[in-house]
Amino acid sequence: MIEGFFVRSRSMHMSYTVGTYLAERLSQIGLKHHFAVAGDYNLVLLDQLLKNPSCEQVYCCNELNCGFAAEGYARANGAAAAVVTFNVGAFSALNAVGGANAENLPVILISGSPNSNDYGSGHILHHTIGIPDYDYQLEIAKKLTCAAVSITSAHDAPEKIDHVIRTALREKKPGYIEIACNVAGQPCAVPGPISAVIGHVSSDPATLQAAIAAVAAFVDAHEKPAVLIGSKTRASEAEAASIKFADALGCVVATMGAAKSFFPEDHPSYVGTFWGSASSPGVREIFDWTDSIIAIAPIFNDYSTEGWTAWPKGPNVALLDKDVVKVSDRSFDNIALSDVLEGLVAYYAEKPKKDATVVEFGRIHSTSDRIDADIAYEVAETKLTRADIQSAVQGLVTPETTIFAETGDSWFNVMRMKLPRGARVELEMQWGHIGWSVPATFGYAVGSPERRHILMVGDGSFQLTAQEVAQMTRRKLPVIIFLINNAGYTIEVEIHDGPYNNIKNWDYAAVVEAFNAQDGKGRGLRVTTSAELAEAVNVAVANTEGPTLIECVIPRDDCTSELISWGRHVASANARPPAQ
Ligand code: DPX
Ligand code: MG
């Protein structure tokens, strides 16, 4: 009797474990899935996570892919989680965590860790480097995340878990939680309201007003402003406010390469991509002509500035970043970008439009540009070209489409796409890890099954992470993969060629068939003419029960002109001699 009573009262008051607490928080922040690879340090934790049916466990072939799958899921869903085992698993996943940091995505890496009794015991454990010191993984994670904790006791697990998730969501950066394998199933406190974790921090009112006044004064002092949208606009939750700002101001708007699709391309002010010589037609010229640039959440690095040759900076550039504004030698922080933009919208509501750049763009921009020429896609028994692939992808783009473009000439191909409102492009331009796109597309597709998913990936990149196509097959995800087989690392060929840019050819279509084994419905097709490509696209669209990979065979040097000119500039920047 007494024992029965004790058990009942215990379950009433202590119905959470560390693992189910974590699962509850993950599902409360909107995760319907988490990604995992099993290992003995995380098995109890995985059991605990499985108890929450509203956050499904999705498996990956390896931990690098698991991290990238979560990174892709965060792109679709705002946040993500990956669960791995100690050292051997986590070290692979940390590469993707570096990527999530570079790409401003709140991915929570959760690692199983040693039994709490083994910390400080002198015991040597498997999967470790063979020293009885278990904090080195945490120390590495601290460098790569905005918050990292080690949980070796259920007592302080709730506040540690909440701290990491809250900080990651606010900063839009990855977080790290390791949980001792014997603690994951221990009883712990009941979660409090989720508002403590997801609540927004308000802009400082005085700083906000001062920043809005400073940007308004900057714009008022110029005649020909232009707006440049950067890749942190999404992480800044400022996409909607930037459209309102563009409406109010009336000047041209361009997106940086990494921000493709972060501003609607059917907007009357939109002119295309600004990326030095790789810009859309007329865009570099209008940015040369403008007297001021309002740069919204940009990342200016060697690639995005084309080897530092197209870098908007100086007194004629106002920088409106995620929570900082820098204009006319003044700096304002602790303010949300969307609040700044909304304040400027109110300021410009009754003022005449600053549309000089729109008028001038209409004069200098020729409509008979090469993008339109490329879109004329002829189905014929001619050798397949890069332009054919670009046209085939363009033909598939709907408002519900997301195109993933891997590092390589896929970047420049996708820049040429004309996107209807709603279509999205996903790129990993800051981290630039080849192979990212296969698992990231998988994760994104898990998070957004209602969309059409297209992946453009080069042969070299595909070889890093090809296994994750098997998970698309396992989950019957109808991802359409255009694998561009140009016999090597063409982007590197254009930057600096050598024998290291040649790769072993694969029968890529056969690889996908091999992943099917007895039950998969993936399709692999190899095409060498535009007619075969057209036929393969029809097969891909009809295959709704698994991925379809179309291996597109083209000559090694058949690349975009943008890649050639961009590659030359980047090569020059790399080749600068050491300063004397
Ligand atoms: C490397 C790159 O075949 O694309 O269009 O042929 O260039 P293209 P591929 O996928 O080749 C990619 C290749 C080797 N970059 O050209 S971009 C260096 C590199 C990297 N990431 C990692 N290792 C090496 N970006 C993980
Ligand atoms: Mg290639």
Image (cartoon, rainbow, N blue to C red):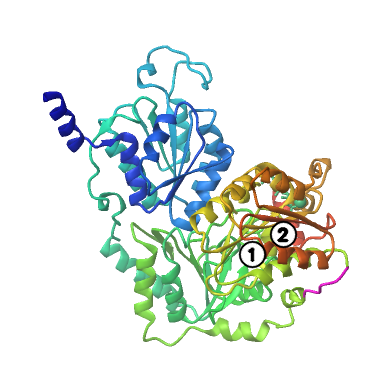
Residue placed at 72% from the left, 59% from the top?
A: 566
Residue placed at 66% from the left, 75% from the top?
A: 285
- Judge left or right: residue 100 versus residue 546: left
Q: Which mark is residue 22?
A: none
**Mark 2: C-beta under 8 Å from nearest atom of ligand 1:** no
**x and y, in percent, of residue 86 in the image:** 48, 28
- Can you identify the residue that label 2 sits on? 566
Find residue 153 and report its image quarter.
Answer: top left
Task: Please name whichever residue, 30 or 497, is drawn nearer the observer in this view of the structure.
Answer: 30
Q: Specify start and end residues of the magenta stretch as a single range.
A: 377-381
The three-letter amino acid code for the residue at tag 1 is Trp
Does residue 463 belong to the magenta stretch? no
Element class at badge 2? helix
Could you tell me how far apart the alpha carbons at marks 2 and 1 are, in whole angstroms? 9 Å
The answer to whether one can see residue 515 in this image is yes
- Can you identify the residue that label 1 sits on? 275
Q: Marks 2 and 1: CB-CB under 8 Å?
A: yes
Q: Predominant secondary structure in magenta?
A: loop
- Judge left or right: residue 176 versus residue 567: left
Does residue 378 belong to the magenta stretch? yes
